[in-house]
Structures are given as structure tokens and as C-alpha cells.
Image (tube, helix red, strand yellow):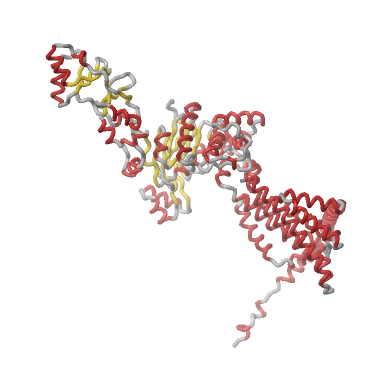
């Protein structure tokens, strides 16, 4: 993933009602949505929303109903026009597009997946998937070919000529996804695409989306009201409330540093083990020793730090094993070098491992787990108690 | 007590009616040639349809209706019942009258669709047009049907032409209304999807909105046919030949039996038309689900 920005919202607001000017003044002075509605009759669906979406990332927007998330996503393909503010696609202001440019933008650059699928019941699976190609006048043979490829990609081979009514919910959304991908767009807008599906199918579809995304590297703007889904799929997560953005961050930072109580509440409702990785709960090892250290030095270190084991690392901080205080005393008494007594039978894990994945490991281990990075360097340790406390 | 408190004061009464009479009559005088031209066209069209219907031998007609009825309902029995009904019309000596009635109904349904379908789309897509046209439709539907007969007669004298005019004005309303209703009530997300994939207004209309609205539009067609059928009977008053005329003559002579036979025939024809077009609606609905 590179860092160039594909879509940017700049101070976007969307107000519904007559007295927009007065409402804007109130909102500028920090009035909230309810107050503005009571005083002016204007609904502030969006207020001063700014963010950037990087090419190739999954940008998840999360909020409850009425938070403005569906309004903002419809601004990106001009199904909604912002009252004020600008949206840039590759640094072009999309509000300046003329009619033909809007059509081309929708046909080639950006496509959408809908909550209730938005499929055309009078068309077959294949005809639905080919719809975007049909409206841009791709020759029949070519669009059938392309639609067949898409059908296969979402695993619906053999269903091409079936009517939409014969499909299950999950299959319908596969058609929705295939239709959106058939145009080979740069950006995929997904408006709560999996909310109407039952939990098991939902998990399948999330997995499907991630595997497709890793293959095609599309930019995805994903709307959801499910924080687990946002954290699972999103590279970046934006949380919205009452038409405003409250926090934009990576899932990890958001769960470790929530901007306010509202975000914290939202996150508390999430299953944290799915989000937090080991590095968020590990602690630095209290006592480090090197193989060439004298046993007496190791004993002193352990005694000073009030622990009964020391972690042994080499010059490059790479983890070698542990030494207990009993072994260190034996080494001193028998005048043997410290490495003779290094216990290498210690469980280790990578710093990015999800906590949910180390639960069983931590339960089995006699000692705290050693947390390592890619180069086997010791980054910290994680005790059974710390894992359990994080839940 | 002052008199003007008891009775509506005469000084405040004005006569719009005769002004309208004069205007319509003047219009009819001034555009005699154009009106005659229209009249000739309509008569040619109706007798064309009549000739076409009459060209079909009676037994082919009955078998065809029976087969269509069987296909639409999926039951052989239903086809046989339709055949028996038409056989009854023939054996009552009213076959030719039925064809005359059907030819006016057909012409006015065609006219209703040709005018009403596009108008319904315009109303659905353009809010301002809807605000203007909707009250007119309400007016057309609630106005007593006899009121249409008079201007039609002034413009086209008596016969099939004014009958067609009056029938169409009366029967076009459901076609317009249900077309517009169908288009505006297509699932919003489906229309959004059409737009989001870069459809032009026409593409969205032809590829998505009209096909999705088809069951409702067919319902409109069904109602239009039924209303045309009922109006064409009333139109016997202004000289439209057919089953209605038979009833009118019998009524004038207070001949119960002679009025009853064409009455039953009208009911039979109406039932067949309704069920056949309703079957069309159902099959559309089944397809779009």
C-alpha cells in the first residue's frame, strides 16, 4: 500500500430544510443536531466532515443509524450533493463534473454495493452483474465474458441464468459485489453490505471481501454499525455521531486511545481479543541478562528486581531463553558458565498476534510468553494474568 | 327577514354554463374541417378493428379465447367456461354487436395506452408536471360520466367518434395513474443502483424502472379496459352501436327479456377481458419476484 490519497472529503456538510443559513450559524457556534432541529427545523445530516482515504485501503465508517454515514457515502458518487464543502477524487473536485463526466466517473471509477442488495429482480444473475457494462455500451460478447469471470470470482458458477429470487441473502450480496467489481472500479463504496445477512454468512462474506481485496487491491469505503466488523476489515476506522466525525484512527490506536467516552463505549461493546494484539498488553521484561554475564551478576539482577527468572538475550537483543534464580545459583556454586543452564523451552509469540490467538498458548505455558518481533528480538513478555485481564 | 338571507341573491348568480356552451360551439364551427378530418380518421380506425375482428371466423375466435384462458389460468375448465360464455353470446344473436362494442373498446384502450403511458412517466419523473396533472385526473375521474357526452357530441355529432372520445377520457385515468404509481414506487435502492452504475435517465427508465413497474402498469391496463367496457355501454346514448345500444332500445320499449340478454353478454365479455388481462398481471408479478 502506498500513501497517495484517492478520495478526500473537505468540510462536507449536508443540511435538509429551508432555513439553512441560520442552521449553519448555530452549528458553527457548536450547537448539536437536536438543538438545531428544534430552533430552525433543519436536519443536519452531515456537519464539517473531513477525511482522506488512501489508495488501496479499507476505510471503515462506523456509527449508529442517523449518524450520517449513509449520507456521506452517497456524496462520493454524487447520489447526494453536499450543501457545502468539497469532495476530491484524485484531487479533482467532483462537484465540478459535467453530466458526461459524472456518468464516466460512475461507470469507470467508483461503484457501489447496497445494504438490501439493490438487485434488479427482472434480470438474471448474469444480467445483473453485467448491468454496469451494459450502460456503458460494452459489446454483448465482451460483457458476458467479463460477467462470467466475476460470477466465478464470487463463487456463483452455474447460477448465471437463474433469477434473483432463487438466491439466498448471501448469494444475492455476492451478485451485488460481482456487479460492483465488473466495472473494474478504483473505489468500492459499500453501504452496510453485510448487515442484512445472518452472522455465519456475514463472516463468510467478510472473509470473501478481504481475499478479493488482497487480490485486486481496490480502495474500499465500508459503512457499518458493527464495531467488530469495522475493526476486522478496516485499515482505518472513522467513527461518526450526529453527522460529525469523532475519531479517525487505526483499529489498534482507537481501542487503546479512544477520543472520548462515546468512542470508549462503542469499543467496549466490541470483542477486544479480535482487535488488540499482544504488543498492546505486553510488559517489558523486568530482568535481562546476556550469555557472557557472570552467574553472580545474573543473581544480583534478579534479586534487585525481585524476580525469580531472567530473560537471556544476545548482543542483538535476540531472545535465547530464560534462566531461573536456582539455576544461576547452581552455576555460581559449580563455577559453570551461565549458558549451560539456559532454559530454551519457553513459548514465544509474535508481537502482532491477536490476543484471541494466544489465549490457549498462555494458558499452557509455565512462564510468561516471550514476545518477539520479525527479527526474533525480545520486545516484551506477556503473562497469563495480563492476557486474561485484557478481556 | 330580508329576502336575500333566505334565498341566494339573484344578483350574485352568474351563468358560466352558457358561456362555455357558446365557446364549445364556436370552437366546433371554427374548426369544422379539422374535426371532420379527425372524425374520419377515428371512424376508419374503429371500422378497421371491427373488420379485423369480423374477419376471424366465430369458431376460431372462441377456440382462441378458450386456449388463451387455459394457458393464463392453467386450468382446462376455465378455458371451457370462456368458450361457453362466448357461445352464449353467439346463440343470443348478439355476436356482431359484441364485435362492435369490442372494436370501440379496443380503439379507446389503444388510445389510452398511447397517451396515458408516456403521460404517467412524465408525472412520475417531473414533480411539477405531477402537481398540475394530478388534480385534473381527480376531476376526470369524479366528474359524472354523462358530462363528457355533451361536448363530444357537439364536436363530433353522434356515433362512434364521440363515443371513443368520451370513453377514452374516462378510461385513460387509471393508465396514467398506475403507470406513474408503478414508476415512483420502484424500490429506491434499485433506482439508486441504476444511477450509481452510470445510467442515463433514459437508460434507468427503460432498463430498470419500467420493467420493475410492469406489474403495476399491467394493473392499470386491466382497469382501463374494464372502465372502457363500462363507458362504452353508456355511450349508446350518443349513438354508439353495439351491446349497449341493444339495452338502450329494450329499455325504451320496457322489454325486460330483450334488455337482459345483451346485459348478460356484457357481463360475460367483461369477465373474460378482466380475467385474461389479470392473468397477464399475475404472470408479470411472478416474473419480477
Q: Position of residue B282 (x, y in %)?
A: 67, 50
In the image shown, does B278 or A143 lie closer to the viewer? B278
**Observer able to see residue B194:** no
User: In the image, is B94 to the left or to the right of B115?
Assistant: right
Q: Position of residue A91 (x, y in %)?
A: 48, 32
Q: Position of residue A23 (x, y in %)?
A: 42, 51
Please state, as top left, top right, bottom left or bottom right, where the N terminus of chain A lies in the image: top left
User: In the image, is A118 to the left or to the right of A8?
Assistant: right
Q: Is residue B63 above or below residue B156?
A: above
Q: Position of residue A248 (x, y in %)?
A: 38, 37
Please tell me which residue is depicted at 66% across the width and 30% down the height of the picture.
A139
Seen as rendered, the residue at the extreme bottom is B1
| Total number of numbered discs in the rendering | 0
Answer with the quarter of the image where residue A120 lies. Answer: top right
In the image shown, does A349 or A56 lie closer to the viewer? A349
Q: Is residue A80 above or below residue B94?
A: above
In the image shown, does B159 or B36 lie closer to the viewer? B159
Amino acid at each position: 500500500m502506498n500513501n497517495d490519497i484517492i478520495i478526500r472529503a473537505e468540510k462536507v456538510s449536508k443540511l435538509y430544510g429551508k432555513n439553512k443559513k441560520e442552521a449553519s450559524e448555530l452549528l458553527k457556534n457548536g450547537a448539536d443536531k437536536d438543538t438545531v432541529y428544534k430552533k430552525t427545523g433543519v436536519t443536519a445530516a452531515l456537519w464539517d466532515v473531513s477525511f482522506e482515504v488512501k489508495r488501496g485501503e479499507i476505510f471503515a465508517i462506523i456509527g449508529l443509524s442517523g449518524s450520517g454515514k449513509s449520507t456521506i457515502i452517497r456524496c462520493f458518487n454524487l447520489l447526494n450533493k453536499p450543501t457545502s464543502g468539497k469532495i476530491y477524487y484524485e484531487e479533482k473536485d467532483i462537484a465540478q463534473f459535467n453530466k458526461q463526466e459524472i456518468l464516466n466517473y460512475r461507470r469507470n471509477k467508483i461503484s457501489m454495493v447496497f445494504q438490501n442488495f439493490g438487485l434488479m429482480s427482472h434480470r438474471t444473475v448474469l444480467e445483473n452483474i453485467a448491468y454496469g457494462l451494459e450502460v456503458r455500451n460494452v459489446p454483448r460478447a465482451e460483457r458476458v465474458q467479463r460477467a462470467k469471470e466475476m460470477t466465478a470470482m464470487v463463487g456463483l458458477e452455474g447460477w448465471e441464468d437463474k433469477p434473483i429470487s432463487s438466491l439466498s441473502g448471501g448469494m444475492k450480496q455476492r451478485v451485488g459485489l460481482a456487479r460492483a467489481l465488473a466495472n473494474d472500479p478504483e473505489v468500492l463504496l459499500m453501504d452496510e453490505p453485510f448487515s442484512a445477512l445472518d452472522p455465519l454468512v456475514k463472516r463468510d462474506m467478510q472473509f470473501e471481501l478481504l481475499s478479493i481485496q488482497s487480490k485486486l487491491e481496490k480502495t474500499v469505503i465500508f459503512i457499518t454499525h458493527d464495531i467488530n466488523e469495522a475493526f476486522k476489515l478496516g485499515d482505518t476506522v472513522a467513527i461518526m455521531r450526529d453527522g460529525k466525525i469523532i475519531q479517525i484512527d487505526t483499529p489498534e490506536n482507537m481501542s487503546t486511545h479512544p477520543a472520548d467516552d462515546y468512542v470508549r463505549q462503542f469499543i467496549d461493546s466490541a470483542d477486544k481479543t479480535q482487535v488488540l494484539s499482544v504488543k498492546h498488553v505486553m510488559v517489558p521484561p523486568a530482568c535481562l541478562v546476556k550469555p557472557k554475564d557472570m552467574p553472580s551478576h545474573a543473581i544480583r539482577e534478579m534479586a534487585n528486581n525481585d524476580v525469580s527468572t531472567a530473560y537471556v538475550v544476545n548482543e542483538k537483543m535476540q531472545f535465547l531463553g530464560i534462566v531461573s534464580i536456582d539455576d544461576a545459583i547452581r552455576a555460581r556454586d559449580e563455577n559453570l558458565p551461565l549458558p549451560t543452564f539456559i532454559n530454551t523451552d519457553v513459548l514465544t509469540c509474535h508481537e502482532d498476534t491477536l490476543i484471541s490467538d494466544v489465549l490457549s498458548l498462555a494458558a499452557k505455558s509455565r512462564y510468561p510468553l516471550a514476545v518477539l518481533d520479525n527479527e526474533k528480538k525480545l520486545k516484551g513478555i506477556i503473562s497469563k494474568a495480563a492476557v486474561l485481564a485484557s478481556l | 327577514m330580508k329576502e336575500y338571507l333566505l334565498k341566494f341573491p339573484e344578483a350574485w348568480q352568474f351563468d358560466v354554463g352558457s358561456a362555455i356552451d357558446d365557446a364549445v360551439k364556436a370552437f366546433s364551427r371554427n374548426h369544422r374541417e379539422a374535426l371532420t378530418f379527425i372524425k374520419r380518421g377515428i371512424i376508419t380506425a374503429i371500422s378497421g378493428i371491427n373488420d379485423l375482428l369480423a374477419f376471424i371466423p366465430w369458431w376460431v375466435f372462441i377456440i382462441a379465447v378458450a386456449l388463451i384462458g387455459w394457458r393464463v389460468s392453467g386450468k382446462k375448465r376455465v378455458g371451457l367456461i370462456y368458450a361457453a360464455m362466448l357461445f352464449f353470446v353467439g346463440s343470443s344473436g348478439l355476436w356482431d354487436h359484441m364485435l362492435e362494442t369490442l372494436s370501440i373498446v379496443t380503439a379507446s384502450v389503444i388510445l389510452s395506452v398511447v397517451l396515458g403511458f408516456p403521460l404517467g412517466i412524465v408525472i412520475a419523473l417531473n414533480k411539477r408536471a405531477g402537481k398540475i396533472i394530478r388534480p385534473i385526473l381527480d376531476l376526470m375521474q369524479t366528474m359524472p360520466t354523462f358530462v363528457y357526452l355533451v361536448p363530444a357530441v357537439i364536436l363530433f355529432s353522434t356515433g362512434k367518434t364521440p363515443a371513443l372520445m368520451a370513453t377514452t377520457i374516462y378510461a385513460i385515468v387509471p393508465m396514467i395513474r398506475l403507470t406513474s404509481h408503478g414508476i415512483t414506487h420502484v424500490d429506491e435502492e434499485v433506482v439508486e443502483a441504476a444511477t450509481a452504475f452510470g445510467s442515463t435517465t433514459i437508460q434507468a427508465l427503460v432498463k430498470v424502472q419500467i420493467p420493475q413497474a410492469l406489474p403495476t402498469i399491467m394493473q392499470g391496463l386491466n382497469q382501463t379496459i374494464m372502465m372502457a367496457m363500462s363507458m362504452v355501454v353508456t355511450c349508446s346514448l350518443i349513438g354508439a352501436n353495439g351491446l349497449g345500444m341493444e339495452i338502450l332500445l329494450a329499455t325504451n320499449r320496457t322489454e325486460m327479456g330483450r334488455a337482459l340478454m345483451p346485459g348478460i353478454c356484457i357481463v360475460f365479455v367483461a369477465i373474460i377481458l378482466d380475467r385474461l388481462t389479470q392473468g397477464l398481471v399475475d404472470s408479470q408479478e411472478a416474473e419480477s419476484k
